[in-house]
Image: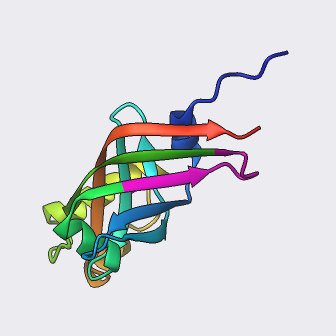
């Protein structure tokens, strides 16, 4: 029996841990572990992050980014490259910046048990939503 062909988009959609690469001001890559959500139909990667982090500062200066994920056994990997847009941080629990984070949570994880608490934490933690339109995907099954 022949194995199914490798589909890097499938791996991106299944993975909840990855490494986000952004570009430092000196041109070197900056790598951050993240918990991404890939919307396969829309070809968008979402990541929630804090304002003031290196990745947020790098993306505000240069929106090019790449996300790499691997299978649990390490024999498959996939990379999505694209241009990121940042939304937030919000100061109003019901403002558009926090609403974007609510929508992200809903598509990635479903309903939250306490939306009031979630909204408060998004404001107090100065959360930012990265939306990366995927422009190129590649990857491989190593064995």
Where is residue 33? Give x, y as percent.
Answer: 51, 69
Question: Residue at left 15%, top 60%?
Answer: 96
Answer with the quarter of the image where residue 21 lies.
Answer: bottom left
Check the image and name the residue furthest to the top: 1
Question: Residue at left 76%, top 22%?
Answer: 3
Q: The C terminus appears in which quarter of the rendering?
A: top right
Answer with the quarter of the image where residue 141 lies.
Answer: top right
Count the marks: how many? 0
Would you place residue 127 above or below residue 73 in this image? below
Specify the segment rendered in magenta.
Answer: 66-76
Would you place residue 124 above or below residue 131 in this image? below
Answer with the quarter of the image where residue 58 lies.
Answer: bottom left
- Inspect this view and state whether residue 110 appears: no
Is 17 placed left or right of 75 in the picture?
A: left
Question: Residue at left 29%, top 62%?
Answer: 129
Check the image and name the residue furthest to the right: 1
- Inspect this view and state whether residue 115 appears: yes
Is 12 placed left or right of 107 in the picture?
A: right
Where is residue 104? Give x, y as percent.
Answer: 35, 54
Q: The N terminus appears in which quarter of the rendering?
A: top right
Question: Residue at left 43%, top 38%?
Answer: 137
Q: Is residue 72 magenta?
A: yes
From the viewer's side, name the closer residue of 43 and 103.
43
Is 85 placed left or right of 48 in the picture?
A: left
Image color mode: rainbow
């Amino acid at each position: 029996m022949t194995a199914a062909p490798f589909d890097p988009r499938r791996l991106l959609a299944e993975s909840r841990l990855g490494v986000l690469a952004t570009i430092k001001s000196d041109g070197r890559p900056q790598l951050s572990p993240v918990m991404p959500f890939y919307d396969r139909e829309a070809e968008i990667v979402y990541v929630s992050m804090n304002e003031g982090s290196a990745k947020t500062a790098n993306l505000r200066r240069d929106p090019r980014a790449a996300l790499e994920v691997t299978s649990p056994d390490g024999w498959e990997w996939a990379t999505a490259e694209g241009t990121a847009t940042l939304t937030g941080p919000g100061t109003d629990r019901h403002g558009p910046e926090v609403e974007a984070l609510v929508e992200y949570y809903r598509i990635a994880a479903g309903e939250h048990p306490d939306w009031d608490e979630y909204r408060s934490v998004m404001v107090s933690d100065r959360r930012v939503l990265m939306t990366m339109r995927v422009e190129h995907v590649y990857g491989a099954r190593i064995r």
